[in-house]
Image: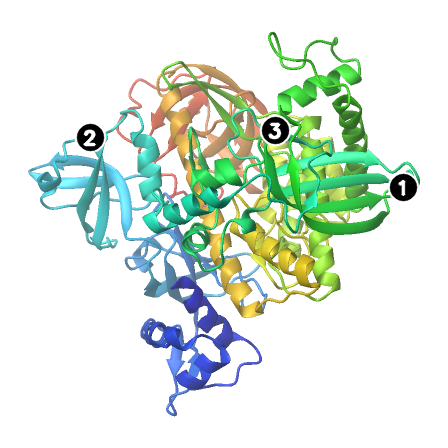
Amino acid sequence: MPDLLAKVLHAVTAKSYVPLKAKPLFKRLNLPESDYPQFRKTVRELVRTGRLSLARNNTLRAADVHGTVTGIYRRSASGHGFVRPHTVDGTFKPEIFIREDKSLDAATGDEVMVRVTREATNIKDAAGEIVRVLERNTRTFVGTYFERDREALVRIDGNAFTHSIAVGDAGAKGAKPQDKVVVEMLRFPTPDARGEGVVTEVLGPHGAPGVDTLSVIRAFGLPEAFPESALAEARQVASQFAETDLHGRTDFTNDLVITIDPPDAKDFDDAISVAIDPKTKHWVLTVHIADVAAFVKPGGALDVEARNRATSAYLPQKVIPMFPEVISNGLASLQEGKVRYVKTVRMEFTSNLQKGHVEFANGAIKNRKRFTYEEVQKVLDELSGVSSPSPLAGEGKDEISPDILPMLRRMRDLSLLLRKKRFKRGALELTMPEAVLEYDADGRVNGAHFAEQNLSHQIVEEFMLAANEAVAEHFTKYEVPFLRRVHPAPNEEKLEAFAQFAGILGYPIKRVQDRFELQRVLSETADKPERAALHFALLRSLKQATYSPIQDEHYALASQHYCHFTSPIRRYPDLQVHRLLDRWIRHGSASANTEELVALGEHCSKMERRAETAERELVKLRLLTYLSTRLGEQLDAVITGVADYGFFAQAERFPAEGLVHISSLVDDYYWFDESSHTLEGRRTKRRFRLGDRVRLVVARIDLQRRMLDLRLADTQPKAEDDRSNALPNYGHFPKRGKRRK
């Protein structure tokens, strides 16, 4: 029970905690008596793994091991790794470098205890050695099966381990060489010993259709099939739903309401309407959000499964939903022409964008029109004279309804005003284009491009931001604990490093804590070659956004009170907020347990990161698979990172980033200048620095390690330079100033 474990740890490590014995601590947590056996088991496990200590009088205390810290381990391709310490009272500590021979058998994502052997200074990073693995992130891995010298082995995908894993008699599962398989780890590898595991599932031959998706699903432990109890509950609520039953709901079914979504969207969880009050001349923005809470009983089978999943996962060509499709694509989805239940936020704005009256309602709507982003953008272009008037959706479809056109114009105007106001308060806009894969008729990737972010996207974005803020401000005003979306301000050291980086590229920042200075740099580089390097560098300087009931700002949005409310079909935190709002609408009051919200926020944050990482992994794998058929193709790219072993570059018109290893720069000896992020030829003075544009060739793909190897288009590798067996070990590098060829 991850939630229970988090509750115990949070209680014992709180500043106000007075050491208690197990039973009084259990009572303080206000848990039901039925949870006591699991509570005792959790406490014993925390003591056993060293995260709690038991005093002589049997009181429980936070572990206090001299000179040690706990955190999450991350292994690099070199074999060395880093530990990110847990935050203590909101304080972030620097990462700790772990040499490979000091890592025990830790794997990426494991929670570990580290003995610090060198404190961080301005010159050197902190260093340490792992003394104990406290909790495994996973024991399940995916890799490629092969045989060598009569030994059955699996090469695990990515950089999880340096060496392959022995799997004994894999023939029992029918594994054949080059099959993708799932491995349950029995003994994790160490720097001195090969790991040992057992094949639990054969996914299929490497490269076979669908095997890549299945591999990522298994590797990240994403759920697939819903339990029968959840499906039965979904079918039951579906059978009880009637579009004519609007009891207790405000009837918005005659209002002009539309949805705007991607063309391939299956679930529609937000609908919008914009009007101008004829008396006050105020803007009236109404946001209707699918009322999932009307169909999902707290504590029921549907709710338990959704809470465990915490989010939908949007993989290429496959969605793993948080709710069964009868809910996500049916009952809750705001489909065109269907009566659907909603949570409604109605906001008034004066002509100078001061927020006026805000009200909330349990409502019902009938979506007048389902638009795609492309369709709305086409109308907006016609309104601005960019393109000639034409039927909205193409041949054979009706033209746009005459009463919708004025509303689209109002939507455009209000969203632009809200956006301008948001930037005036210091909001940051990081331009990080999303990769969109292109497929042929057989479902194979035949290209890719960057997703377009235009005015139609901005309309929806601004209106959802406004609704999220309105709900968060309401609960804050009435001191109702709720699950916020927080994005703490970055550490000043991180911002200073970014300012130095930006200055090297010709964008000096005088006051690094000034949001508007950062905003200026982001704006000035939005359409420049160095955009990718600068925007990504700032992103890495910021802390991760998380879910938490603890009041904090959302730094990037420059919002003091913010939550996620607008996507309850695919995010559990939104559903939690909906339930609170429902109690407020019905009873005029609402409450929640803060400690429970802390545990829920941590769980949802973790599951969100898992789903996002899995999506990126599969997109990257498919891009590399596509590029593996196009070796020798040339790409225009921008240098996004420089090190003493080469430089990374991002293709300008294709969403792929790869490494130009220094060994491929055969025209000179190159020196790395860390202060200017530059590689410079000793003889030719040729330089490669951040933001430079270069023309590159796709040289080699390593699907196993997810790596793209590039080289300059105007160079050729030496004949004796055999790069066919393995990519260079990118982790073992000489110190600064060494000469590299």
Residue 85 x, y percent position in the rendering:
48, 62
The answer to the question of whether label 2 and label 3 lie on touching residues, with beta carbons closer than 8 A, is: no
Colouring mode (rainbow / by chain / secondary structure / one colour): rainbow
Question: Which residue of the protein is positioned furthest toward the left in this rendering?
Answer: 150
Q: Amino acid at mark 2?
A: Gln
Disc 1 packing (10 Å; few <14; some 14–19; many ≥20): few
Quarter of the image with the C terminus in it: top left
Q: Amino acid at mark 1?
A: Asn
Residue 169 in the image: above or below residue 474? above
Residue marked by disc 2? 178
Q: Circle 1 sits in a helix, a strand or a loop, which is it?
A: loop
Residue marked by disc 3? 337
Residue 689 in the image: above or below residue 200? above
The mark that comes first in sequence, 1 or 2, is: 2
The mark that comes first in sequence, 1 or 3, is: 3
Q: Which residue is nearer to you in this view: 710 or 470?
A: 470
* Left or right of residue 72, residue 597 in this image: right
Question: Which residue of the protein is positioned furthest toward the right in this rendering?
Answer: 279
The mark that comes first in sequence, 2 or 3, is: 2
The quadrant holding residue 678 is: top right
Q: Circle 3 sits in a helix, a strand or a loop, which is it?
A: loop
Residue marked by disc 1? 352
